[in-house]
Amino acid sequence: MYKHPLEVERSSVIRSIEWLEERRSLAAGGVYGDTYPVTWGADDNLYVGTGDPMYAIVDGRPRPCTWREAHRDPKLYGAMGGLAFEMITGSGMDFDVFRVNDMDGFTGPGGAGPKPTGVISVDGTIYYAIQNMLGIKKTRNRPGSQHGSDATIIKTTDYGKTWTPDLEPLWKEFEAEHYDRDVLLTSNIKEWKTPDEARGEYKGFKPMFPGPLFGGPTFVQFGKDNMGALDDYVYAVSSDQWDNGSELRAGRVKKERIMQAEEWEFAKKKDGKFVWEKGFEDSNPVLAIDGHISTPEVIYSRRLGKYILLNWSLHRDFYPAEGSSLSVFEANSLFGEWKLVHYEWMWELQEACPYCPRIPLKWFDQDTLTGYLLFSGSWQIKNPWYRPHVRKFKFVLADEVMKGPKV
């Protein structure tokens, strides 16, 4: 296990990220949220899973609100919820966000409720990975961090209007039985009425990936509606907790069996080499950096034949006021060996505290390796950062550095 991203061997192919423009924020007011796993749908739109959208659509317009307000108004609470499903239109130069589905059954703020981790469009169907399906649990390591566990996958064939299986009614019952909403009014109330061990399942529901090891799967993105995929598998990676985890795991499944947990295979070391085998409980991390592996993102570069991993970590566990770091890696395979491409100790600004970097492939030129990074920022209330931002960038190749500028 590495102790820091800078200990990882540097890439000899991609030397760095070059920022081409300053950060650009969503122009529309009243839209707040985070996480934003993104996929390029078959209808040519970008779709995102939005975590903790701190606003509701009222009379057709975004209506920002606090959890205290939502506590008093069930309509606001459900619309804000723990997550939503949204569409991004436009380009990196000028984009907007539209609410597709409040998903108002998935309630609960932060780790108290479900959080989005991955979305992918495959043959016209969109799959949505959601974690924390059994409420807050203890973190695997670093007690001050936010957990990320108990993940499951749902799907839609109508671009987010309806979902299968429909777990919203079940979560509403679960939250009402186990979660104390009055915690939103005071910090002196224990959020969960029942201990972790009493929440291993609910009325026959069990998450596809119980526990933290594969508790936040993020799907590997290849292109529009998964075009450009190298084979008939869908791939995913996961950290072992939401922020400042330590291990990255990889899994795969035949694309027609994404919803079948027993069909998933995971990276495991056999005789010193990685292989794909079923059962994530005895899987091995494909990258381990103590306290520096958070909710990840992976895309595939067709030009380079490389997987590119975007990663981040908070300078202080689950505390945005001290800022965050950005680290980027590349590898020929999800098995590794991962090589460091780029590291920024203070990513953007300290008060911005960006996290969950994503690369919308619709906005990424596979030939020039130029695109836009999508991310959110500090969730501290009443700040300009807790919303979608983008920044234009380019992957700088080693041979470009060696050639130097033209004279």
Image (cartoon, rainbow, N blue to C red):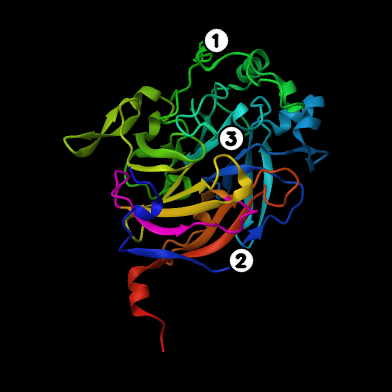
The amino acid sitting under disc 1 is: Lys
Predominant SS of the magenta segment? loop
The image position of residue 354, as x and y in percent, is: 58, 51
Name the foreground residue: 204 vs 223.
204
Classify 27 as above or below 269.
Answer: below
Q: Quickly name the residue at label 1.
A: 203
Which numbered marker is on residue 195? none
Q: Quickly name the residue at label 3.
A: 158
Image marks 2 and 1: residues in contact by CB distance under 8 Å:
no
The image position of residue 333, as x and y in percent, is: 30, 48
Q: Mark yes or no: residue 113 visible.
A: no
**Which residues lie in the magenta part?**
332-354
Residue name at image x 63 percent, y 56 percent: 90
The amino acid sitting under disc 3 is: Asp
Q: Quickly name the residue at label 2.
A: 22
Name the foreground residue: 126 vs 145.
145
Q: Quadrant of residue 274?
A: top left
State how far apart marks 2 and 1 are (Cα). Answer: 49 Å
